[in-house]
Amino acid sequence: MSLVKRIIIGMIIGIILALTIPEIAKPVVILGSLFVGALKAVAPVLVFFLVMAALSQHKSGHQTNMKSIIVLYAISTLTAGIIGVIASNLFPVTLSLTAASAADVAPPSGITEVIKAILLNLVDNPIKAIYNANYIGILAFAIMMGIALRNSSDTTKGVIQSFSDAISKIVEWVISFAPFGIMGLVFDAIYTGGIGALVNYGTLLMVLVGCMLFAAFIANPIIVFMFTRMNPYPLVLKCLKQSGITAFFTRSSAANIPVNMELAEELGLDKDTYSVSIPLGATINMAGAAVTISVMSLAAAHTLGVVVDIPTAIVLCVLAAVSAAGASGVAGGSLLLIPLACSLFGIPNDIAMSVVGIGFIIGVVQDSCETALNSSSDVLFTAVAEFAKRRKEGTLKGSTPWKDK
């Protein structure tokens, strides 16, 4: 049985137990605690190796269209983060957090304190950063290590990639136990907050999916038009149909790489470019993840009564875009980066991981939509960069060049 079906069954069982025999079934709460604890254990190591491995794979001297593609990835991800922040302020959502208490939070007094905290976290000892789940420090050191290792031997890069793959596999193992963990989390949410807790989750889900649909059908087409000066929707819809649908069900950008490779070949793109940009995009092109990170971290802030001013919201947009680049290519990877954004508001890691748990509860729909947006835009912007280059060189053929090989 697929993971999605097992998660749905776990949710249903958790709801039934909470509504029928709450006192007898109370020990199932430990399942949710164990699941969140396992996520807390693996998340810092995952971020470190995933980002370092992605950046170290670059080969100097190899001429590709990668600069334009990376710029498009960055624009798309940053735009998605901005969409998430705006939507969260237009439609504020509060959550039922078991560990949440306003007394536990020391919100920053302003943007100066936020920037100071970021700078201090950037230079934190990497071992200490991993131990304390300081995601800003982890991300900074991983980026520096990845760049420093670009000229290392293929053997060294292979070892780093192997570690990254191994950590990703561990994440898959942890997530395979999600049905049990979610059963405990759903039970705990209803037992402590009543059935109304799920209503809040439904509102959160609508905000998340609404932002992703806006990014897919409005923001991304605008970006495509700006670079190609052509009707963007035939290409956007083709990528969503052939890549987004499969990504929706696999819920893994990494698993969808072969599908995107085949689509890139069908579009007649340069193999030397898409063979690099598609796997890289599965790691760093995370518009859906930026939406998830920004919306859910702001939902935690709203729940705890933390006031987010405009400068801090701008920092959150940038941080959501940067941290989204470290999202894992497996199901639920972006949820593990929510604590990074929550740290902006002084929200403790334990509370942030409770938000991660909620993310897995709604992940049946949220993560599917997120992965569909992420993965389909990998091949979309690879194609856009090449078509924009052809347009500049005067070699772009026809009004629908994606049909011309």
Image: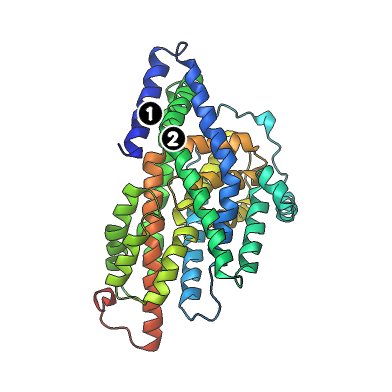
How many C-alpha atoms fall within 10 Å of the one at disc 1: few (<14), some, or many (≥20)?
many
Which amino acid does the dot numbered 1 rest on? Gly
How many C-alpha atoms fall within 10 Å of the one at disc 2: few (<14), some, or many (≥20)?
many
Question: Image quarter for residue 228?
Answer: bottom left
Quadrant placement of the C terminus: bottom left
Q: Position of residue 313 (x, y in %)?
A: 60, 51
Q: Position of residue 123 (x, y in %)?
A: 74, 56
Q: Position of residue 40 (x, y in %)?
A: 58, 39
Q: Secondary structure at mark 1?
A: helix
**Residue at position x 44%, y 35% in the image:** 178
Give left or right: position of 111 versus 21. Answer: right
Residue placed farthest to the bottom in the image? 394
Q: CA distance from mark 2 to mark 1?
A: 8 Å
Which amino acid does the dot numbered 2 rest on? Ala
Mark 2 and mark 1 lie on one chain; the one further toward the N terminus is: 1
Above or below residue 6? Residue 307 is below
Question: Image quarter for residue 273?
Answer: bottom left
Residue placed farthest to the front in the image? 155
**Residue at position x 51%, y 32% in the image:** 35
Q: Which mark is residue 10?
A: 1
Residue 90 appears in view: no
Q: Position of residue 191 (x, y in %)?
A: 48, 19
- Which residue is denoted by mark 2 in the rendering? 178
Q: Are marks 2 and 1 in contact (CB under 8 Å)?
A: yes
Q: Secondary structure at mark 2?
A: helix
